[in-house]
Image (tube, grey):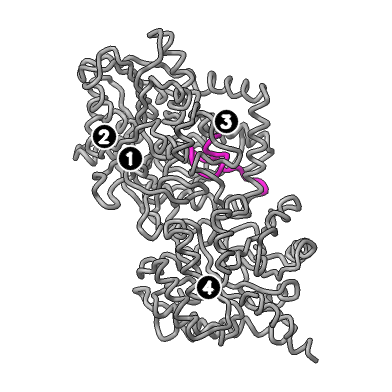
Amino acid sequence: MSTMTDALNTYRGGPDEHGHFGLFGGRFVAETLMPLILDLEQAYTDAKADPAFQAELDALNAHYSGRPSPLYFAERLTDHFGGAKIYFKRDELNHTGSHKINNCLGQIQLAKRMGKTRIIAETGAGQHGVAVATVAARFGLPCEIYMGATDIERQKPNVFRMRLLGAKVNPVTSGSGTLKDAMNDALRDWVANVHDTFYIIGTVAGPHPYPAMVRDFQSVIGTETRAQMMEREGRLPDTLVACIGGGSNAMGLFHPFLDDRSVAIYGVEAGGHGIDVPNGHAASMTGGEPGVLHGNRTYLLQDDDGQILEGHSISAGLDYPGVGPEHSWLKDTGRVTYVAVTDKEALEAFQLCTKLEGIIPALEPSHALAHVQKLAPELPKDNLLVMNMCGRGDKDIFAVAEHLSMEM
Amino acid sequence: MTRIDETFDRLKAEGRSGLVTFITAGDPDYETSLSLLKGLPGAGADIVELGMPFSDPMADGPAIQASSLRALKAGQTMRKTLAMVREFRAENQTTPVVLMGYYNPIYVYGVDSFVADASEAGADGLIIVDMPPEEDEELRPAAAEKGLNFIRLATPTTDGKRLPAVLANTSGFVYYVSIAGITGTAAPDISSVGAHVARIKAHTDLPIAVGFGVKTPEQVRDLAALAEGVVVGSALVSSIASTLDENGQATAETEPKLLRLVEYLTEPLHQRAEASAV
């Protein structure tokens, strides 16, 4: 690994033809699924080479989702922190309220191309589930969403939205009833319905080609940011910050900048009750070890026997014991710095952003903002910092009220 | 010649197919599970598959998921699973033990230590569900070096293009997954299994064992007419589950009920052998 890292002249060349990012990634799936993911890889390769595919996706992004999302100068937070000049990439303004739609529009186009007639997906916070249910409604395909019973309880508004959109929401009670268990059950559904079903994975994880494919669909975030920053400031940003659960919003922002060595990049994991609290966080890279789960090798929360831990985060969207394999590789190569912030720090950032900017962030990007709060005061005033505001906080108001002991 | 090869040779000489039984190591606790394992050959199991419990068994249905979680809750670890094989092997030198599971616990244990310890304990083969041919280079050669058969899975979706790759480097036997699905759910369609098994046999001389969804002696009889082995798993772990008390502990019924079920499922195999001997 290290010799390869030293010799790297690009960080944007992965994965290799087998879906590996160095040690990470791959296709660790049951034989039943292998022919499918090989088909999917071929279909995606063909689609990428077809200008009509990209043109259709661009049109949907523009007219259905509302892209490009604004690059907003957060003036009051900048003044408050007294350091770097803070911009938000406003992906929470997309249709359905998060970055998840970017990926779903791409994958549903691919499902149509492949002639698949049924859509399944997993969801944690429900943002991905809502985005999948939305595109399934828009393209007239039946859709089933797997969601942990615990998450259904803490994300009721999103469950209702999915049902309104016509999706069937299947509660998952196996394991801990959260995102990893939902992903297990979605994989089980897929194995049993391989002939007609397309599985829209919501993050840059899973077997190859998902990590690369989801990254490509999300890279619209970073590509827009580059152009918008050039227009606003006449140069590239100096610092990028994004939250990481599976890591799709972060990969989308980071990837177009990976070879710009002047850009410092930070991924912020969910530190829960604290990195030192056993099984009390969801920071796979900051507090986990490499392992194999859900089709890829990556950093995982696990015990000494290789059993996967449940993890904890106040944010259902970050409460996943793994992370996309490309992030694991970027961590080991040192190109991206990964840190963790606690539930408490994220809640404080949530309130600060709401009060100073009039933007109610989701709890996920509140983690990113909590790290901005640590970074920005130490940086010079001409340091251009972009934080991905990847989701809006409407879904989280019930959880926040409970944590702050406020009456609704 | 591994114990697996010898077993299939013996079955061929007897003119019958074999029963391959699956239970999860440590379900519902170490001692009970060891006792069940020791009892299986006497009840008619020709090969025993021992599940290495994993927290996230993605290719398994509810019955085997639950058995895996019961074992983990009772404190089962990879070290204990290998200890169980060692204790079994001290008493039984002929029945092959195939360790079946997912890669992560092996990866974390360390591939070289694992194949050395598994071989030393007396295991004969490995089935790693989430290691398709594309990814098994980091385990299969190390296992082969220690004399462990590496048994690959072929499924209804394994098309003609993939089949040679799946069969290359497979040893011991080929495990044909009878349904596109997870363990213990849909029943296999016998005519479709027949066509697939015939297709595999055109490419290999290895014995074939068919599993997933096998619950009744009738199914065992029908599949035994097509393949050298029939695998039963979910039905057995469901039997174990049905005898546990409200705290999930084994009862006096756990062992006799499981062994009676295995005897019952084995009956058609021996009737066939007698018929062909006449």
Q: Which mark is residue B49?
A: none
Instruction: Report whether residue A288 is seen.
Output: yes
Q: Earlier in the sequence, mark 2 or mark 1?
A: 1
Residues at marks 4 and 3, CA–CA distance in whole angstroms? 47 Å
Location of mark 3 (residue): A106
Q: Residue B154: x percent and y percent?
A: 67, 59
State yes or no: residue A313 in magenta.
Answer: no
Write the residue at 34% across / 18% down. A87
Q: Earlier in the sequence, mark 2 or mark 3?
A: 3
Q: Amino acid at mark 1?
A: Ser
Residues at marks 2 and 1, CA–CA distance in whole angstroms? 9 Å
Q: Is residue B146 left or right of residue A182?
A: right
User: Of the residues tagged 2 and 4, which is closer to the observer?
Assistant: 4
Location of mark 2 (residue): A346
Location of mark 4 (residue): B123
- Contact check, label 4 and label 1, Cβ < 8 Å: no
The secondary structure type at the circle numbered 1 is loop
Location of mark 1 (residue): A315
- Disc 2 sits on a residue from what chain? A
Q: Amino acid at mark 2?
A: Ala
Write the residue at 39% across / 82% down. B251
Q: Is A206 situated above or below B140?
A: above
Quarter of the image that includes the C terminus of chain B: bottom right
Residues at marks 4 and 1, CA–CA distance in whole angstroms? 44 Å
